[in-house]
Image (cartoon, rainbow, N blue to C red):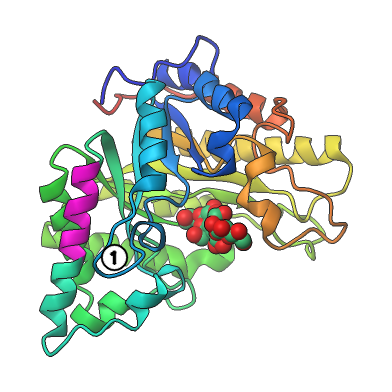
Amino acid sequence: MAGLGAAPAGSLDALARAKGLRFGSAVGAGAPLRDAKYRALLTAECGLLVAENEHKWYVLRPSADRFDFGPADRIAAFARESGLGLRGHTLLWNRDEFTPAWLKVHDFGSRPASAAEKMLVEHIKAVCARYPQIDSWDVVNETIDPATGALRDTVFVRAMGERCIDVAFYAAREAAPTARLVYNDYMSWLPRDARHRNGVLKLLEGMKARGVPVQALGVQGHIGAANDREPEPFAEHDPKAWRAFLDVATGLGLDLLITELDVHDKGLPADRAVRDRAVADHARAYLDLMLSYPQLKQVLCWGLCDRYSWLQGTSPRADKASKRPTPFDADYRPKPLREAIAAAFRAAPERTPWA
Ligand code: G3I
């Protein structure tokens, strides 16, 4: 979708574009999309959007024989009307926790492998056909179990084996012939994620060896100080191990995206200025490392303003203060994180953009 999404001069997307990148954000179809101020902020800063939840099975598929495209359609329409690009998340969130209840107990009959394959392929075809404007898809999300590095045990793995991952990519290739096909996951640069990183690399290496059409790795980028028991909240991260991971992924010929950037401030001091500075500095270090890879083509935040961040409802701070994980505060005012992203784009090497 070249030509879409020319955000105003000085916007984060304009700064990104100057280096061959794109910048965007997730948005939800409920309160966030109804909020005119937030819509204005999204169009002022972004070149592309992604639906936060609305392309997930549990929203799209109220039952085995029904689709509800309503919420996703509202986001797609807003993107179109605003001249913004759209990426898709996700055709298969291969995790039972986020699978609709009916599907977890679905009877696939006497030939479960072929019945499950039929359902998966038909789902992917229907969703891709509905949203031709989507130019990159998280085909599969979070299929690696961080505890073991192996594929998670899920409805589709049980019914049709590990080949469900390949099947999803082949179906997406057929249904969205020009879209970039992405594997998306939350392995991070923390030492404790080594097993997760290795599992993701094993999956990607296997897919590449089999000729499966995976084109990019989506690095979610939920970074930060989630742990308020650490004396130094950011001390743990391991840039060297992270580079080694990215080197192998890019060595496989994959491009990179940061698909869900935010910086958890749970473990940071209450003082807002101190917290905002720490969040911004940590993000800057992360972005500088990521942007040093010319294979990195897009950066999306998981929400642009603190008012709507998913982290507000997750794992509260000990002091119960509202969190500040996104570039704009709850009243839509830019924070140091916005400047850190802008500065990282300004300092980034140029790259060949995705067409
Ligand atoms: O829609 C209902 C609403 O009707 C109800 O009143 C409310 C009460 O809790 O729940 C609402 O649904 C919630 C939904 O977000 C919309 O806000 C779900 O309970 C909640 O589980 C859901 O959480 C989302 C989560 O994925 C699970 O799907 C978060 O918004 C979303 O930010 C998060 O996104 C994930 C990515 O997809 C994958 N990577 C990690 C990332 C963060 O967890």
Which residue is painted at 77% across and 35% down in the image?
A: 277
**Residue located beneath label 1 in the image:** 203
Magenta range is 120-130
Number of numbered discs present?
1
Which residue is painted at 80% across and 50% down in the image?
A: 268
In-front residue for pair 277/322: 322
Q: Is residue 125 magenta?
A: yes
Which residue is painted at 84% across and 61% down in the image?
A: 318
Find residue 78 and report its image quarter: top left
Which residue is painted at 32% across and 69% down in the image?
A: 63
Q: Is residue 302 magenta?
A: no
- Point out residue 241 in the picture as x, y percentages from the top left corner: 50, 56
Q: Quadrant of the C terminus?
A: top left
- Point out residue 313 in the picture as x, y percentages from the top left corner: 68, 57
- Point out residue 225 in the picture as x, y percentages from the top left corner: 70, 54
Q: Quadrant of the N terminus?
A: top left
Ligand 1 lies in quarter: bottom right
Q: Is residue 276 above or below residue 334?
A: below
In-front residue for pair 38/177: 38
Q: Amino acid at mark 1?
A: Leu
> In this orientation, does residue 350 appear?
no
